[in-house]
Amino acid sequence: MEFFLVTLLNSLSYGLLLFMLSSGLTLIFSMMGVLNFAHASFYMLGAYFAYQTGLHIGFWPALFLSPVIVGVLGAATERFGLRTVHKFGHVAELLFTFGLAYVIEEVVHLLWGRAPVDYRIPAELDFTLFTLYTTQYPAYRGFMMLVSVGMLLVLYLVLTRTRIGLVIQASLSHPEMVESLGHNVPRVFMLVFAGGTALAGLAGVIGGNAFITEPGMATAVGSIVFVVVVFGGMGSLGGAFLASLIIGALQTFSVALDYSMLDVLARVGIQIAPTSLWHGFWSITISQTAPVLPYLLMVLMLIVRPRGLMGTREG
Amino acid sequence: MTRVLTTRRIVFWSAVAVAFAVLPFIFSQSFALSMLSQMGIAIIFALSYNMLLGQTGLLSFGHAVYFGLGAFFCAHALNFIGAGKFWFPVTLVPLIGGLAGLVFGLLLGFVTTRRAGTPFAMISLGIAEMVAASALMFTTFFGGEGGIATNRAVGKAFLGLSYGPQIQVYYLIAGWCLVTMIAMFALTRTPLGRMANAVRDNPERAKFVGYNPTRVRWLMMALASFFAGIGGGLAAINYEIVTAETLGLVASGNVVLMAFIGGIGHFWGPIIGAVLVTLLQSALSNYTQAWLLYFGLFFLVIIMFSPGGIANLIALHKPVWNAGLVKRLAPSYAIGAVAGLFMLAGFFALIEMIYHFEAKETSSKAFSYFGLMLDPMLARYWIGTAIVFGIGVALVYGVRKVVARAWENLTVELQQKGAV
């Protein structure tokens, strides 16, 4: 029970972090039809900027400053990069963000080196929030959840209750109509791109010190975010939310479970001799399969329901 | 029915064959020979990738999966031959890799090709991640971190070929490269190749003509995987070791870069890309640590300013060349080259300064830049390189208009001559 509750809490905080990334990605995708390959790179930049600015001004100002810098970079990417490439079609746009991810990783190598940087949890949050049975639950995990949920609420309110949110929603489905009504749709695109990347940056600020800040962090989380978006249904925020929590739980639980098929088979009374050809296959533990499970889930989803959990279009 | 074996084609492919045969005599150093072998493998891989991206419009981020699986199957086949479990000429071992690629292309392609466009790109990435993660899981087949080592000089020498010396391996690769190039070119002229283009441009209309776009994509995917597998098999023979990196995401990304830099709109574009990228990778990495950054930026520049790749740039100049008007462009191009060199010199210097500034060594951070000593610890060098770069940017910005005007005048003249 203790194991279950603690892992559940961990998976929740991880899932919410995934949603901060996938929400921006999904918003950008459904609006511009561009799948931003560099999205996780902005997450990485958020962590590195927070580390660098945090050295001078402390964690709390960096928490606000870093996403803003990342958002400005995102806006510049849209304005000077994507908009130029837009006329060449979706493949060129996709490849542009792909190349950008490549370049950002190299720039991080250039500026901060290949080794992980020492980006730490602030001292104010480095205490035990509560003790569950025997496990001490760190306060920073709680803080992560608080920030994610707060951001989620803000995003929801902005999209449904403000004027700009309504314009964004309208531009999702009827960009021409919105343009004829006198709104600057390209500027809305730029804002959405900036907002999405700023969210990724914020996720980087709170995720970078909880996990590890190193040049490989973008690729590590990038493909998982894609799985989330495909699994939840391309362009669906609700789907992305559900999928983030499911994939988060799947990854956290599978890493923690150290059972193999051999144990399961032994329970029902089947023994496989160690000399058997398939012994190696059956002795793989669940935690060993953890890196593969999300992708397997995605492939299964695509076979059973190609549009994803809550997607409306086949893409 | 049009003739398949036109005189022009026979002459062209014979010339390619002669060139392949003569190359090792011109570049006879051992490193040049291994680079040529590497290029041959890259050409097969890039061309097979373009069957997807260029001809069928499928942007795959996981093509190295089939290349790598082909390599692994060949490595195991070589080891089996070495252990005397069965006899098979090493010359034909790449075919085993091709078959492995074909089988997995059929299997995984069945899932991936149900969608096109952006979803396909994401799914191919997911599949690639899945295979790469599995490769570290199933250590018996993939050899874990260390990979699978093999020995190409196994079995009885077939037709006097033992594949001990690199020169024999080069000719093996060159031979397979020629055969697969012709096969892939011929494929573009078959009904399937034509339908692939139709599916790329307008799947709905292809459907109305009576073809199933999913089926066409699936077939093209399987065939592309077949050729990639052959390339992988040759890589196994060439390097005599196959690691999980061979089928990883970096390798998949690399082939995207090759094909796109070369140009996906022309059959021969990826060949240029494969040769250039292989050359840059081994040449640049000797001189600078930042070569991956330059490489990525080069890719971005190509996408933003010439999405047709280098092949398109060449094709653009062909009518000018035919009309004998190249000398009209020469002056503006010369000015452009000077301005561009100025900008690049400043840019490279800046990047190298940052790299050396961040470097760990404490005694002296000064370094030689094309024979010029630069010291990143002194402000005047920073100011100097920044000024050079700034002037370069301004020059390029100004020269852009000169080149554009030269092209405008030329286009008018070409139209009058009726060359366009």
Image: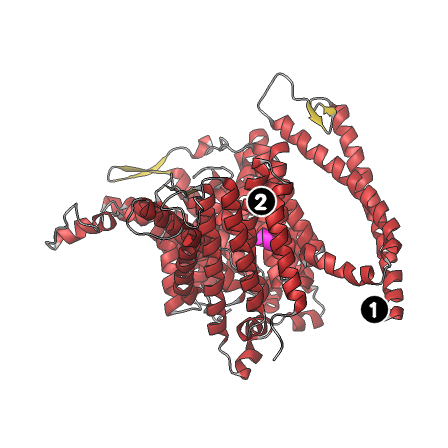
| Badge nearest the viewer, 1 or 2 | 2
Establish if B356 lies above or below A290. Answer: above
Same-chain status of marks 1 and 2: yes
- Which label sits on residue B419? 1
Q: Which is more N-terminal, label 2 or label 1? A: 2
B39 lies left or right of A1: right
Q: Residue type at mark 1: give it.
A: Ala
Establish if B2 lies above or below B117. Answer: below
Residue A68 point in image, percent of width and height: 61, 45
Q: Nearer the viewer, residue A104 or A195?
A: A104
Residue A288 point in image, percent of width and height: 30, 46
Q: Nearer the viewer, residue B318 or B89?
A: B89
Residue A91 point in image, percent of width and height: 60, 61
Magenta range is B256-260
B218 lies left or right of B352: left
Residue at 50%, 32% in the rendered image:
A115
Establish if B352 lies above or below B147. Answer: above
Regarding mark 2 in the picture, which secondary structure is present there?
helix
Residue B353 point in image, percent of width and height: 68, 29
Regarding mark 1 in the picture, which secondary structure is present there?
loop
Residue at 77%, 24% in the rendered image:
B380
Residue at 64%, 65% in the rendered image:
B9
Please name the residue that numbered disc 2 is placed on: B36
Query: Which scheme is used to colour this image of the protein?
Result: secondary structure
Q: Residue type at mark 2: give it.
A: Leu
Q: Numbered disc 2: what chain?
A: B
Q: Numbered disc 1: what chain?
A: B
